[in-house]
Amino acid sequence: MTEAMIGAAPDVGLELRGVSLHYGGKRSWRRKAEPVRAVDGVDIVLGPGETLGIVGESGSGKSTLGRIAAGIEAPSAGSVRFRGEPYAAIGSAAWRRQRRSVQVVFQNPSQALDPRLSIAAQVREPMDAHGIDAGGGTVEAMLARVGLAGLGGRFPHQLSGGQLQRAVIARALSLSPDVIVCDEAVSALDVSVQAQILNLLQDLQAEFGVAFLFISHDLGVVRHVSHRIAVMRQGQIVETGLAAEVFARPQHPYTRALIAALPAASPAARRQRDARALASLLKA
Ligand SMILES: Nc1ncnc2c1ncn2[C@@H]1O[C@H](COP(=O)(O)OP(=O)(O)OP(=O)(O)O)[C@@H](O)[C@H]1O
């Protein structure tokens, strides 16, 4: 058992075992192309109501892993189980039921929303598709819960980026999912709006018990929301552990490099910054 599985109950969580997805590798008339090992033998378990942060540089395979976890893409090897049940074939009726339990919030909310439909209609849409009763003010209550009270009649172009992401979160929540895969969900937002959305996600987790697979290249953001962290590099997980422990005692050189690149997160960098600030104060 690796640290990525600490605290997780395999029969109720999302469980990826030995998951790989390699792209390409086709033979051309000249030679066989090397496959891209986007995800390469990954094991993760996400327990109910917890947040597992996935960090790594661009191209390390985070989004591909997120798409596999959400059932949008099938792995070429390994297994994905939700509550102990293997993911069904993509497009099947069983797969549609599973997809209801595992929702996704992507980086760009304006691409996720239909510009021709009101916000309320878009929160209602997946509920209608899954035969959930959206009557009795359910949509309005959901919008109010994410801070969009009274804005259901607006269209996407009438909302800010942060409000649009709130609408996307409301739409995901309307299906009462057990898991939401957040793929760079706050990366396109201003820092102050990022903080508001992260706080909202934490409040929703406390209220509804939803688990998050929280994917981001931003270690500072991941640290803020995650109970545990998995560090990805070249399709593999090189380090996992409780978030506080990974930050306090990073084991892998790659993790150390990521943390060192985060000025405010590294104690040494913080001391340097404070010394510089003091020096300029004394000079003034
Ligand atoms: N559909 C695809 N076909 C071929 N290669 C792909 C495909 N999707 C991703 N890749 C490759 O797989 C690797 C991992 O990509 P992925 O988008 O998962 O990384 P990432 O860590 O999410 O990066 P970023 O943060 O930049 O999105 C990259 O080398 C990428 O070029």
Image: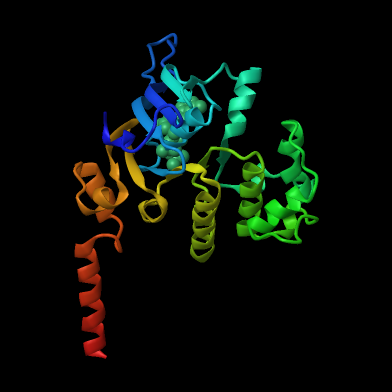
Q: Looking at the image, which residue is at 51% across and 66% down?
A: 192
Picture quarter with ligand 1 = top left
Rendered-image quadrant of the C terminus: bottom left
Q: How many marks?
A: 0
Could you tell me which quadrant the N terminus lies in?
Answer: top left
Q: Residue at position x 59%, y 47% from top?
A: 108
Image coordinates of residue 105 in percent, x first then y, are 57, 43
For the question of whether residue 36 can be seen, the reply is no
Q: Residue at x 68, y 51 (%)?
A: 142
Residue 246, x across and y down, in percent? 26, 48
Residue 95 in percent (x, y) is at 60, 22
Q: Nearer the viewer, residue 127 or 53?
A: 127
Question: Which residue is rendered at x = 42% and y = 10% of the image?
Answer: 27
Residue 267 lies, with reference to residue 94, above or below; the image says below
Q: Position of residue 260 (x, y in %)?
A: 24, 55
How is this picture coloured? rainbow
